[in-house]
Image (cartoon, helix red, strand yellow):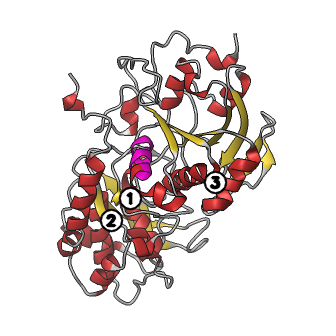
Amino acid sequence: MPVGRRGFLAISAGIVAAPGLGVPAAASRGRVRTGVERLIASRYEILRGRRIGVITNPTGILPDLRHEVDVLHADPAVELTAVFGPEHGFRGTAQAGGSQGFYDDPRTGLPVYDTYGKSGQALADVFTASDVDTVLFDIQDVGARFYTYIWTLYDSMVAAALAGKRLVVLDRPNAISSRRASGPVLHPEYATFVGRKPIAQAHGMTVGELARLFNDTWVAGDAGRPADLAVVEMDGWHRDMYYEDTGLPWVPPSPNMPTVDTAVVYPGTCLFEGTLASEGRGSTRPFEMIGAPYGDWRWASALTELRLPGVAFRENYFTPTFSKFAGVAVGGVQLIVTDRRACDPIRTAIAMLVTLRRVYPAGFAWRPDNWIDKLTGSDQVRTAIDAGRDTDEIVAGWQGELAAFRALRARYLRYPDREDRR
């Protein structure tokens, strides 16, 4: 029996929301079943007779830790002919802002096309050159607007529409619970690869849900028509799950996202990329440890006095091995989440920025390229902090736009909260 089918033929599962399939969903059996599992369980029904390429990275695994590319390549029931590598690369060897380039995968012999930095017609040309007619997308997201894999998805949808290819999203969990969306909404004039379209900083959606929202709202405007899209949904996932609740193995989606704890704070503390303080890259706890050469015990003390819900702060010193202040000792805090459901990582990060500027007025500085505006989606957060406004005033400033996004988002949510399950 081909390796790709082993252990899956007995799973009574199907595909939801892929046109023409109509296979009933399986009941949950103690863990979440991802889109790729349900694809395999259907004997690749949606892919029959098609030449397939897959956009993925090290997170594209099955629960037994085999990578889906290796499984699909070994299975004669599916014709996998190409792989497309995003930021950090298909096998995941590149650091932030890097990729692996074009090469032949040593294990499978498949050509691996580099998609990082490509969009529009340039990416459509890559899909055309690969000679596939269907592109699969399967990458673990962490729920933040500036985590670039969702924009790889968006760019791939536009490119697929331009090239006349079908795009199939294999859905995976939002790692940090997705009962709510939070944070500022991107203003279109600030669009970059860390935010193409006006969604909230913590979008509270799965990639499959986002794909449908993207297709209905923006893809046709950029490609002239919507993508030919299908989504293979999960079974057994609900919105209040954190990744540890899914029963699935965690694979770091990028080099500086080692744990679910990192992912929980990332939608907030990634904002420190927009400052001249270290966001913890080059440490053992990126985005949880924040520091600068001028930092000391006073920052942790000031933050502790705020009694922010669900978090605690430890005075902390570390020496980054790369990125900002590589080889230089910095002082600051370690952010510790004590109650995930009480913690608001974005409001927490705003309070941290406000307090850092207040405690160290001579040391605090933004990156000179105003990268903070790209991360927050406008200049509103930066200018409010510079004007000395407090955390509650700053958070109040984005509530109107957030409410509008939440109304749009609600039309595309496909999975229930736990209490809705009967």
Q: Are marks 3 and 2 in contact (CB under 8 Å)?
A: no
Quadrant housing residue 46? top right
The residue wearing badge 2 is 185
Q: Earlier in the sequence, mark 2 or mark 1?
A: 2
Kind of residue at disc 1: Pro
Q: Main secondary structure of the magenta part?
A: helix
Is 213 included in the stretch rendered in magenta?
Answer: yes
Q: Quadrant of the C terminus?
A: top left
Report x, y in % for residue 12: 45, 12
For label 2, the SS is: strand
Near-viewer residue (280 or 52): 52
Q: CA gap, disc 1 to disc 3? A: 19 Å
Report x, y in % for residue 50: 66, 30
Kind of residue at disc 3: His
Report x, y in % for residue 99: 68, 57
Check residue 340 in the rendering and tell me which mark sits there, or answer none.
none
Q: Earlier in the sequence, mark 1 or mark 3?
A: 3
For label 1, the SS is: helix
The residue wearing badge 3 is 88
The residue wearing badge 1 is 267
Q: Residue at x 21, y 60 (%)?
A: 403
Residue 53 located left or right of residue 281: right
